[in-house]
Image: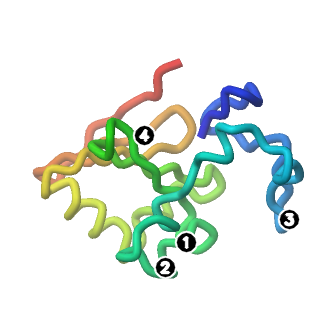
Amino acid sequence: MGVTALDKPAGRWCTHFKKAQGCRIYDDRPADCRIFNCLWLLTEALDADWKPSVCGFVLHSEAGGGRLIVECDPARPHDWRRAPYQATLERWAGQGQEVLVMTGRAGLRLLPDGQTRPVRRAG
């Protein structure tokens, strides 16, 4: 995801991230990073399978919870299609939840009828 305070665009690794170590500036990270919580941490209904390091994506919401964003790891852009993720995301879309699956600037909107529509991130 984008981090304005670090001039980090969406869809690119943060320069402060180090594989197997995490954030190298965690104690001094900007407010943008401090206030973010993956929905996996906030939603008891999502079990350990939805932990970002397991599933290959981070979940967050926009528009007051009206839009669910699935931010895929660019190294694992199709992991969201594995069970149980794709079926669950499609079910949520079918129930009226707006669901966007993004990898970098490109992505898909999951439609209530089971179809998808390509989308691009602004900016």
Amino acid marked by disc 3: Gln
Say which label, 1 or 4, has the lower sequence index: 1
Of 81 and 21, the residue lying toward us: 21
Residue pictured at 30% horizontal, 61% vertical? 89
Lateral position of residue 64 relative to residue 71, left or right: left
Residue 14 x %, y %: 77, 42
Three-letter residue code for mark 1: Lys
Q: Pointer 3: what residue? A: 21
For the residues labelled 1 and 4, the Cα–Cα distance comes to 21 Å
Callout 3 secondary element? loop
Q: Which residue is identified by label 2?
A: 49
- Sequence-first tag of 1 and 3: 3
Label 4 crowd bin: few (<14), some (14–19), many (20+), radius 10 Å: many
Marks 1/3: CA–CA distance: 16 Å
Q: Determine contact: label 1, label 2, CB under 8 Å.
A: yes
Q: CA distance from mark 1 to mark 2?
A: 6 Å
Q: Badge 1 is on which residue?
A: 51
Provide the secondary structure element on which disc 4 rests.
strand
Q: CA distance from mark 2 to mark 4?
A: 22 Å
